[in-house]
Image (spheres, rainbow, N blue to C red):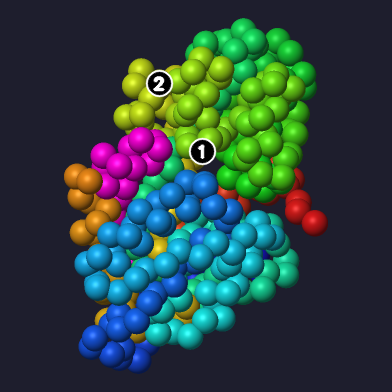
Amino acid sequence: MNIFARAAGAGLAVAVWLAGGPAAAADYPARTVKLIDAFSPGGSTDYMARYFASRAGEAWGQPVVVENRPGAAGQIGTSAVAKAAADGYTMLVLPNEIWSVAPLLYKNLPFDIGRDLTPVASIAKVPIVMTVHPSVAANTVGEFIDLARKNPGKLTFGSAGEGTLHHLSAELFQSMAGIQMVHVPYKGTAPAVADLLGGQIQLVFSPISAVLPHIKAGKLKALAVADTVPVAALPGVPPVAQAGVPGYASQLWVSVVGPKNLPREVVDKWGEQIQRVMLSADARATLAAQGIEPEYLPQQELARRFAADAAKWEKVIREAGIHVQ
């Protein structure tokens, strides 16, 4: 099934998401809630999940426990939620690359995004930073593009793996900038950043949390942020679109989703809690230390954002000829 067929199916699913499933118990939550993170502890998704879980648990008077289920590029944890009971007691924090990108790359996913999951609301954005090793003779996006044009196929960029948002962000950049670089895929963000620190590669488009300490220490250079607006944690660092590649944008954002047929009452309670917690002054101050920007986008707007995101990356994947085995 191609992306357009998937999008049509997802569009039909929106009506189901918005209607919700059977009525939930009025006293939800009446016991411990499990919030699954499909990635390893210590990452941006894990950090914001634990922050939200602690605040929501206090408000609800019931524990919200974060459980890490990493593996298969997020597929294991996502599959667990897709197969869970639709009662609101097993939920998932989900980066957009799982919803928007994974169905475009993997032919045999153990779940169907549009059919098996219910989007609830977004909770935060994790800025992506265009980061280079200090030895790279460029201090701006324009200088980097000039350097790459003078050395076609010689500069290398690392990613957390083939088809990850790190990879797609760089592919979009080199396509729009008219340059040619060599992709070096790694098994995760940490090893890619480690080789960037060691000078084995020249560039990484990385979530801010993985590179911010090194940028502050002067061990790496931030040339730009991939978002459309500046990032508070990196004052003076411009968006790529304002620094040499007009129209460029790549965003990593995290949402809460649940199983299919999630009851409307449960969706509403989660949405209300996400809005209360993530738009608070405490969230802005606490998450800013990690470079994370809290946000709240309700279900219907989130569904539209997912659809637009999938269409954007389908084009990048097709034009770059990206294939994942």
Q: Quadrant of the C terminus?
A: bottom right
Q: Amino acid at mark 1?
A: Pro
Q: Quadrant of residue 183?
A: top right
Q: Residue 208: where, in percent of width, then height? A: 47, 35
Q: How many dots with numbers? A: 2
What's the residue at 30%, 84% (across, down)?
A: 30
The magenta segment is 283-300
Does 143 appear in magenta? no
Q: What x and y, as percent, mark residue 6?
A: 57, 69
Residue at 30% x, 67% y is: 57
Q: Does residue 225 lie above or below 67 as drawn?
A: above
Q: Is residue 131 left or right of residue 181?
A: left
Q: Nearer the viewer, residue 135 or 321?
A: 135
Image quarter (top left, top right, bottom left or bottom right) of the N terminus = bottom right
The residue at the point 24 percent across, 72 percent down is: 60
Would you name the residue on which mark 1 appears?
207
**Quadrant of residue 199 within the rendered picture:** top right
Q: Which residue is mark 2?
A: 237
Disc 2 residue crowd, few under 14, some 14–19, many 20+, Cα 10 Å: some
Element type where label 1 sits in the image: strand
Q: Is residue 304 left or right of residue 174?
A: left
Dot 1: few (<14), some (14–19), or many (≥20) neighbours within 10 Å? many
